[in-house]
Amino acid sequence: MSGLHLIASYPRSGNTWVRALLTALMRGDGPLDINALEGPIASDRSFFDNALEIETSDLLPDEQRRLRPLAHRAVPPPGKSFPIKTHDAWLPAPGAAEPPFPREAVGAVVLIIRDPRDVAPSFATYYGVTLDEAIAWMARPELSIGNSTQGLRPQLPQLVSSWSAHTASWLDSGLNLTRVRYEDLLADPLPTFAAIARAFGQSAPADLLASAIDASRFDRLQAAESSEGFRESSPEAPNRFFGAGTAGGWRQRLTAAQASRILRDHGPMMRDLGYDD
């Protein structure tokens, strides 16, 4: 299957876990090196510098956003490639005329969706904010990540928008999209992971899928991060990238008022996706 392959998700929804699963499947048996996961990150600054032969650090934020899809047009998608991680919404960012990926260049998308009540505590930990702040951020249509006022970051800014708007943007994109709930991948990993692999044009026997699932268990990921560190962890929460990997933990983490606020902010989309308990 040609074209860009994208693993899309709102931040803290399981994107890196899916990359770990696909990396383990590709490499076969053996321990998984969490600091050598396959696949680029869509907002990687060096890709755009090389593709456009410019220094993006010399550009204004609006100019960077406008040029992101042009970089993918300058570097045609390979016939087959490891999927690219993205937290971008399928929306034009301020200053841009189109989403960050050219529609004609996208071959397949797997959208990972997670209950926003479980996203909020993980979001708060990763970004070093309070739960109330995380909940407020997740309701902001203009929310962007990757911004910095203290030096150059290795990634360009990304418009993620609110949890609801982000999810709707991909579901309504008209792209070749496979929707996967984080909770289903936890509860029934073998068929759910098989569907992810098929979406990216990969087929594998059940024993290889099961081996990759075992190599990517959350206790293994946590142990590796504890002993080796993880280069994608946040400065605000070093070596706390991989959590317990459970569903429904929000019942112990959120107050009734906080859970109600998330439901007020995102109720229609939550109900559509089965997050209405």
Image (cartoon, rainbow, N blue to C red):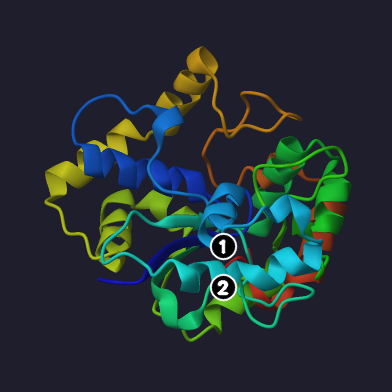
- Quarter occupied by residue 69: bottom right
Above or below for 243 versus 22: above
Above or below for 228 versus 201: above
Residue type of the residue flagged with mark 1: Leu
Residue tagged by mark 2?
Answer: 70
- Quarter occupied by residue 170: bottom right
Residue tagged by mark 1?
Answer: 52
Determine which of the numbered discs, if any, sits on residue 131 in the image. Answer: none
Q: Nearer the viewer, residue 113 or 255?
A: 113
Task: Name the mark nearer the viewer: 1 or 2.
Answer: 1
Seen in the image, is 59 located left or right of residue 250?
right
Examine the rendering and report whether any part of residue 256 can be seen.
no
Q: Quadrant of the N terminus?
A: bottom left
Q: Residue at x 43, y 83 (%)?
A: 104
Could you say whether the residue bearing mark 1 is in a helix, strand or loop?
Answer: helix
Question: Which mark is first along the chain, 2 or 1?
Answer: 1
- Percent position of residue 168, x then y: 62, 77
| Residue lying farthest to the top in this orientation | 227
How many residues crowd mark 2 within 10 Å: few (<14), some (14–19), many (20+)?
some
Q: Nearer the viewer, residue 230 or 41?
A: 41
Residue type of the residue flagged with mark 2: Leu
Could you say whether the residue bearing mark 2 is in a helix, strand or loop?
Answer: helix
Q: Nearer the viewer, residue 252 or 62?
A: 62
Q: Residue at x 33, y 60 (%)?
A: 196
Examine the rendering and report whether any part of residue 134 can be seen.
yes
Marks 1,2: beta carbons within 8 A = yes
Inter-mark Cα distance, 1 to 2: 8 Å
